[in-house]
Image (cartoon, grey):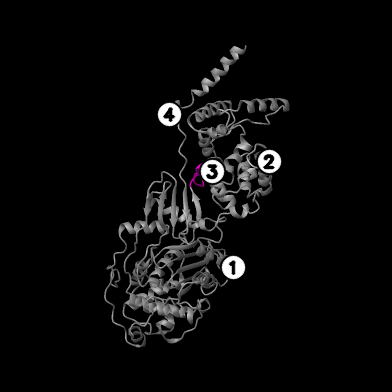
Amino acid sequence: MGLWGLVAVAGVVGYFAMKLPPIDQLAVPKRPPNIAIMASDGTLIANRGEMGGSAVPIGELPPYVGKAFVSIEDRRFYSHFGIDIMGLGRAIVRNVMRGRAEQGASTLTQQLAKNVFLTQERTLSRKVQEALLSLWLERNYSKDQILELYMNRVYFGSGAYGIEAASQKYFGKSARALALGEAAVMAGLVQSPSRLAPNRNPEGAAERGTLVLAKMVEYGYVTPEMAKLAKTNTAEAKKRSRPGAGNYVADWIMDVLDDFVGVIEGDVVVKTTIDPKVQAMAERAIVNTFEPKRLKQNVEQVALVAMSPDGAVRAMLGGRDYAESQFNRAVAAKRQPGSSFKPFVYLAALEKGLTPDTIREDAPINIRGWKPENYTHEYFGNVTLTQALSMSLNTIAVKLNVEVGPRVVARTAQRLGIHSPLKANESLALGTSEVSPMEMATAYAAFANGGTGVIPHAILEVKGANGKVIYRRQPQNLGQVADPRVIGMLNRMMRETLVTGTAKRSDIPGYAAGGKTGTTQDYRDAWFVGYTADLVAAVWVGNDDGDLMKKVTGSGLPAEVWADFMRNAQKGLPSRPLPGTQDAGGLMSSIFNSNEPAPLPAPVSRTVDQPGAWEGPSAKERSLLDRLFGR
């Protein structure tokens, strides 16, 4: 009977072995690549990929990390050959005595075999194949290699696969920096990751971690004193594991990454232009200024994008809470910009030869039955263009749009960075064509840098796991898109908006800044887009469903958010004038003091005012811009 029993077992093993690939063709499947997205200072913004974190060599982990897993999961790991005969016998005896399957005896090697090669189903077939694959793993890999593969692939709960992903999620640090108590918590999770995840059950995770520490003491891996001093640190795990606003940036980068590096075969590290301090200031501005007022003013969402004048994105918020909504309103939401579009009308007028002191009459107008009015329903008679822009007078903007031509205004906005389609009609001057916050910040960047067109970007460098550079950004822009002298005139006009105009409460003491408010019909959208010589920021507030806000204007909530953010972001930076606003040998003074139109500036690259003369970005540039602006 014993002999026939052995034959039967051999037959079963042989049958299920035949269902496995030939031994000479077996290989541990390649781990899905991880994309680590880093801030400009090297701190982690987010991991992307199926595993949620990169693989960490066992030699880079503290020695007690691996020992914690061995202590609680497989104490004879270093002595068995892939199957723990003693543990298996003990489990069988206990299960028979209890009358139910209460204890398992899977080794770390068997668990790895199951995770790498098999499914989670509990069948005889899977258990036999698991044992066979464990023998193969032990034959082809060292114990440390098996333990490394295990820790980098096992599930730790809350969507975290691998020890690096879990360490970042629960403790906000790399697995390389895990403390003893934290390592014990990590080792304790694999028994029941969904139930013990620290962000869901910090008490249960800590209790299990304490048990792991006791096992480590029992098996001589740590001293009682070390275990006594170890802290499990699970109290803050729930807060840490909540997805942060930096994920909006990470999502945007993932949308465009393949344009730069193609198909990703292995782990990569993406260095970005995001400044974590500036990003934190943006997030604080939302918490401190937006959140206290949003319910009272019936405003559900906000978007903010900030970039340096060369187009490098420094901070991005695509909504008030990434955990609640992953839709990136900074890039993908197209909303009417209202009066924040008017600077493009005035720029077109200045390029036609008008000056900031040119007089136009603020009075009622009628264009084929359309009668646009000022926000206050008042009229001020003869005003300068500077006054008209700072007071955001609708009648003057519409008149200028008609005077220079809506097609010219549309092309002016497009060459500065507006990528969305614009309807070249009379109402264009009042911002009736939809654009995104990213586009508005990009276009205003040309004001902040003296007239150079920029391509918004966040990716500086991409490296493989071996440190090899896969991609490195080279300086790139769209050339001179507006005459610096004309930009200087517009900057002086834009400055007045914050000094005496609709956003005077948002001025930045000690720093020269320009900007423009924007409010759409019936208070559906409110904007403030502004800049200094160092930073450009666009803020939009509104509701995704188009629900009306309670009289929120651009000079209100969005201007307050912008001011809160910019005042903190500018701290410590030297005060610099806006481009072209310095008095260069009396030239600018003579222009501003003259009542005559200034002569047309000399033509520059991409600065034209004749229909059809500017051809726009090249095909390659347009393809990239389509992806960058979420089209």
Q: Closest to the observer: 265 or 41?
A: 41
Residue occupied by mark 1: 288
CA separation in Å, label 3 and label 4: 26 Å
Q: Amino acid at mark 1?
A: Asn
Q: Between disc 2 and disc 1, whose residue precedes?
A: 2
Q: CA distance from mark 3 to mark 2?
A: 24 Å
Drawn side of residue 159 relative to residue 630, left or right: right
Work out whether mark 4 precedes mark 1 in sequence or the reverse, and give the earlier one: 4
Q: Kindly identify which residue carries mark 3.
A: 162
- Mostly what secondary structure, the magenta segment? loop
Of labels 2 and 1, the one closer to you: 2
Neighbourhood count class around disc 2 (C-alpha, 10 Å): few under 14, some 14–19, many 20 upward: many
Q: Nearer the viewer, mark 4 or mark 1?
A: 4
Left or right of residue 385: residue 602? left
- Tell me which residue sits at (37%, 52%) in the image: 471
Q: Residues within 10 Å of mark 4 (few under 14, many from 20)?
A: few
Which of disc 4 and disc 3 is earlier in sequence? Answer: 4
Residue 25, numbered circle: 4
Badge 3 marks a residue whose secondary structure is loop
